Amino acid sequence: MSYSFSLDDVAFLRSRHGEKALQTVSGLELSASSMIADVPEVRSRYAPHDAALIETVRCRRRAAVKLRAADDLLVNDDALQQATASAVAADRTAEIAGRFPGAVVHDVTCSIGAELRELVRSNGIAGVIGSDLDVVRLAMARHNVPAATLLNADALTPTSTADVVLADPARRSDAGRVFRLDQLTPPLLELMTTYSGRVLIVKCAPGLDHMMLRNRFGFDGEVQITSLDGGVREACLWSGPGVEPGRRATVLRTRGGVVTRFEITDRESDDVDAGDVGEWIVDPDGAIVRAGLVRHYAHRFGLWQLDPQIAYLTGDYVPAGARGFRVVEQTGVTEKALRKALTAHDCGPLEILVRGLDVDPDRLRKKLKLKGSQPMSVVLTRIGRKGAAFVCEPGVRF
């Protein structure tokens, strides 16, 4: 269980003495094996703020892979888990500035200010407001984003006339992660009702059933599914004046510190056929799959489907940024057929991909008992009502 910060802790960490203490504590290992020695040392010098110092340093280290300039942040574990990755927040900031130039943006669930930090960097945004009910996180935000206007306020009580309202309802409670829309904090539907008629951007869990939201609750905005470096990060709901209904997938990848961006929408054609396997099997990015845009992606790049209901694509090349598997042979899906085919190719390390079949990859890998030396991949899927297996070379990211 993570440490619960107090306002006194935050005030100490923001003081000159606290800054020096953080520098000292950051020089400690603070690993599982060193904590027995590290904790008494920190406590002897900095009690009663020793736990806050240790938690801050450890969270900063974990935040380094997610948030830029993390070594100066005030952050706790819960806030870090919910914080939007800097690359995703920066992409959204650029889009807000492009779609609503000169806007004032109000993040009504700003927490420690991870998203605010990207907003204040934009020259295309005229003003940035942040508000939150949690006074401790708000105090951290004052340190993290001194350029923003910050308020202690309930997201369901409008406190500004900002042009764009941004919200990230909490998806955790004391009992753990929540999944129902009415269990979010604040509840999603209440949030959308409160800001009806205004530009509202709501960040949600990537597994959000956006079709249910549209069909059952009448959501008439745009659903954006975003992935970063292969992992689907969020479903973002855009609504209000100037927002057209639809779906889109945004695929972000970082290489050498540079973020590349690919996007596809449901306004493109989805006219594709199903056919025999080509030279490659293409596994579309998770954002494309969750946005329901596999066929649109296939049409854009001249690919086709193995089965109209399955998200695997095939073709004679792999689009840039996608992961492809060069097909070696097709075989049956029984253990006997797979073992025979894979053994013939001297397979040892094996990656197993499954769609459309009830197969546990880890369990199957153990049962195959492959003893070869060549790494390979096998794609298990369904074509019509029949299972199919494709033995492939190891997957390659293009």
Image: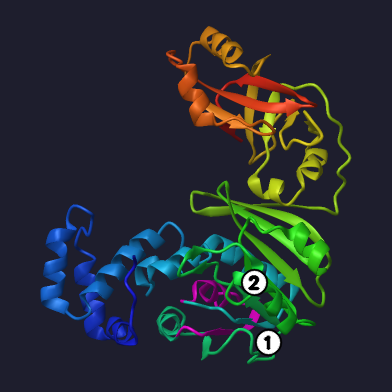
Q: Are marks 2 and 1 in contact (CB under 8 Å)?
A: no
The crowding category of the residue bearing disc 1, from other C-alpha atoms within 10 Å (few below 14, some 14 to 19, many at least 20), is: some
State the residue lying farthest toward the front: 175
Looking at the rendering, which quadrant does residue 208 occupy? Answer: bottom right
Q: Check disc 1 and give the amino acid type.
A: Ala
Q: Which residue is mark 2?
A: 182
Dot 2 falls on a residue whose secondary structure is helix
Q: Position of residue 100 (x, y in %)?
A: 74, 76
Residue 97, quarter of picture: bottom right
Residue on which the image places disc 1: 162
**x%, y% of residue 281?**
69, 28
Q: Residue at x 89, y 40 (%)?
A: 271
Q: Is residue 91 left or right of residue 372?
A: right
Give left or right: position of 357 versus 79: right
Q: Is residue 72 magenta?
A: no
The residue range painted magenta reads 112-134
Q: Amino acid at mark 2?
A: Asp
State the quadrant of the C terminus.
Answer: top right
**Which quadrant holds the N terminus?**
bottom left
Q: Toward which corner of the image does residue 284 lie, by quadrant?
A: top right
